[in-house]
Image (tube, helix red, strand yellow):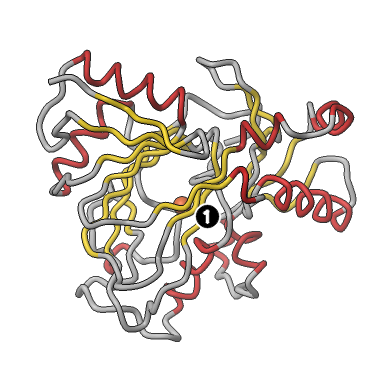
Amino acid sequence: MSITIAGAKPDFFGEVSGVDITQPLSAEQVAAIEVGMDRYAVLVFHDQPLSDDQQVAFSKNFGVIERAVGSNITRPGERRLSTSLADVSNLDQNHRVFAREDRRRLFNLGNRLWHSDSSFRATPAKYSLLSARTIPGQGGNTEFADMRAAYDALDEAVKAEIENLVCEHSLMYSRGLLGFSDFSDEERRTFAPVRQRLVRTHPVSGRRSLYLASHAGTIDGRPMPEARCFLRDLNEHATQPQFVHIHRWRVNDLVMWDNRQTMHRVRAFRETEERRDMRRTTIAGDGPTIAQAV
Ligand SMILES: [Fe+2]
């Protein structure tokens, strides 16, 4: 079986065919997918009815799975899925849609803001793999923005200005943008800010990219309002239509993206009425983007 990856416009989204990812892969197949990831940064595999175990097995081809703890306010006894999977659904532990006022739903609304997964961890995520088990009748698209193209399009003066900048990222910053700020002391400790470079270099292609996320709330050495204005300008630049691809989900799509090179956000749907059951495995990065206390 040979893998085919066909690119779409804009030029960072590839459609993969010729592989059944519910089954074990050969080393050649894994290598072909990695080449596709380095080239495109976002790949979709259609018609892959994965179980959780199969999704975990497929994901392990690409590195170490990041434990899905410390990334939301769900308590251990409320989990719907194992800690190998991030629950990106709108469902509680009984598979029921969250009530409108449910604190977990309000926290998870932060996923509607542009972000890179786990940029709030000292060692942020490399890949995310998101499997669509149940999708709403309308809405709930995921949009991706190519942070390499966004970087390339910056003025040379801006590139020089940002070359060595360092930001602090925290879930408290992104949730705070939506007015969600009633964190417990324990949550404040869990979500303590981490430092990340603003410009990253891809280890294989050598391409530069903007490392942005709504989690970024400060820039070292800059007053807060100035830092936030600047980050807002960069985010507006980086999410212009020419850098964005809209993914309209089909049931049993598996979309895999490189968090080092892209941002993404989910779009609105009737989330207090319809079910959207999406399950994410996350591959940990190689290490921090900058030296810091962990
Ligand atoms: Fe995400």
214 in relation to 163, above or below: below
Point out the residue furthest to the left here.
23
User: Number of callouts in the render?
Assistant: 1
At a point 58% along the width and 54% down the height, the residue shown is: 114
Residue 121 pos. (x, y %): 53, 42
Q: Nearer the viewer, residue 30 or 92?
A: 30
* Nearest to the observer: residue 64 or residue 152: 152
User: In the visual, does 208 lie left or right of 225?
Assistant: left
Quarter where residue 145 is shown:
top right
Disc 1 marks a residue whose amino acid type is Thr
Whole-percent x, y for residue 125 in the image: 46, 37
Q: Position of residue 179 (x, y in %)?
A: 65, 75
Give 225 or 122, whichever is nearer the viewer: 225
- Foreground residue among 175 and 22: 22
Give the side of residue 99 with respect to residue 103, left or right: left
Q: Quadrant of the C terminus?
A: top right
Question: Residue 205 vs residue 134: left or right?
Answer: right
* 244 relative position to 273: left or right: right
Q: Tag 1: Cα neighbours inside 10 Å, few (<14), some, or many (≥20)?
A: some
Q: Which residue is mark 1?
A: 190
Against 68, residue 97 (above or below) is below
The residue at 51%/50% (across/down) is 264
Residue at coordinates 70% horizontally, 50% vertically from top-left? 235
Q: Is residue 282 above or below residue 285?
A: below
Could you say whether the residue bearing mark 1 is in a helix, strand or loop? helix
Mark 1 within 8 Å of ligand 1, using the beta carbon: no
Q: Is residue 101 above or below residue 58?
A: below
- Image quadrant where residue 31 sits: top left
Residue at (50% x, 15% y) in the render: 204
Q: Position of residue 146 (x, y in %)?
A: 57, 38
